[in-house]
Amino acid sequence: MTQSGEKSQQAASVTQTLGLVLVPDFSMIAFTSLIEPLRLANRVSHQQLYDWKIYTIDGGAVQASNGIRLEADGSIAEIGPMPNVVVCGGVDIQRQDHALLIAKLRRLAFYGVSIGSVCTGSYVLAKAGLLDGFRCTIHWENHESLREEFPHLDVTDELYEIDRNRFTCAGGTAAIDMMLSMINARCGQETAAAVTDELIHHRMRNANERQRMELRARLGVANQRVLAVVATMEQNIEEPLSCGELADRVGFSARQLERLFQKYIGQAPTRYYLGLRLARARHLLLQTSMPILSVALACGFVSASHFSKCYSEHFSRTPSEERFGPRQKAARRAVLAAEAKAEGREDTQIPDSIGALA
């Protein structure tokens, strides 16, 4: 028998159960990418290596961000002793009330349960203080907002991080690679490889592989100078460089750089750079509670008024309207209603205006 086979037999002596906590608007692709490798590990090994239970805050059905509703096996209050508990995050996670979940996660961690997350679930773990002193990761779209809100955390750009009894994942199909890594560690290479083939996944990606497509593929541009300038822009959002400084980096004049961008990108470098900064600002507005002025400064704008003007011209809505649109208002009302109920304020009115919510 191979060493991998011996490892698999030993692992099968005890079925490992995972508790999966689904929050509203969770990512379905991250959730299924988490479960399917475990199901297939059972299938290819002809053993019950893994089992899983689904939990929600109140034990009721929960809707994913794609609109599909899933039934739960129980509420988070019913989570008992098990090796691993995973929070499956999704959109607008920072606008939801996680008080009960945070309290439960802290208790589980105290008793030695390994705590993990996929997609934006890392935000809940960070809020609970369970990532302090651990490496962690999150979906690239939420990376900067997590760093802004929790500057003391060691947030990496990895596909996934497994650091002692904490494991976090960027979400999407990266959850497949994290689970394959865990299956490999527990059951051996042979089982992990068989699961990879069943998934038609081609290969097990390493944790340190990039989350996003290479810049060349994203832009559809092969010109090395353009790619170098765009990479420099992405690395200098808070303190933007001038067109002349960008041109100097690639040994061009500002006029030459202008012509190059018009040819390959279809717009002036200054306009493209502004779009990058405004896209970052939009992420911060939607994913953090940072004051609008702080968002403006973090994205290289010298004043809130200048930021608001540029933002309105680009997105056809003000930063305040972006932050407190219909979806965001609904999420905020739910949080305020939960707080009111917890404090016994049954008759508390939830403000409807943008000004009141701000």
Image (spheres, grey):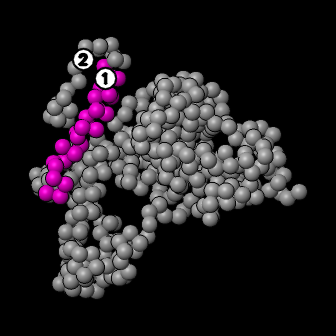
Q: Residue at x 19, y 35 (%)?
A: 358
User: What predominant SS class does the magenta segment belong to?
Assistant: helix
Density class for disc 1 (Cα within 10 Å; few <14, some 14-19, many ≥20) is: some
- Say if the magenta span includes residue 335: yes
Above or below — where is 136 with respect to 340?
A: below
- Residue 93, given in percent of the width and then of the height, sits at 39, 39
Report which residue position mark 2 lands on: 348
Q: Secondary structure at mark 2?
A: loop
C-alpha gap between disc 1 and disc 2: 8 Å
Q: Quadrant of the N terminus?
A: bottom right
**In the image, which disc is placed on residue 36?**
none
Quadrant in the rendering for residue 274: bottom left
Instruction: Give the amino acid type for the residue marked by disc 1 in the picture.
Output: Ala
Density class for disc 2 (Cα within 10 Å; few <14, some 14-19, many ≥20) is: few
Relative to 235, 214 lies left or right? right
User: Is residue 247 shown to the viewer in this render?
Assistant: no
For the view shown, which residue lies furthest in the right direction? 1
Relative to 11, 316 lies left or right? left
Q: Residue at x 19, y 29 (%)?
A: 352
* Front-lying residue, 31 or 255: 31
- Residue 92, given in percent of the width and then of the height, sits at 36, 41
Highlighted magenta segment, given as a residue range: 313-340
- Say if the magenta span includes residue 91: no
Above or below — where is 158 with respect to 226?
A: above
Q: Are marks 1 and 2 in contact (CB under 8 Å)?
A: yes
- Residue 51, given in percent of the width and then of the height, sits at 68, 37
Relative to 267, 30 lies left or right? right
Instruction: Give the amino acid type for the residue marked by disc 2 in the picture.
Output: Thr
**In the image, which disc is placed on residue 337?**
1
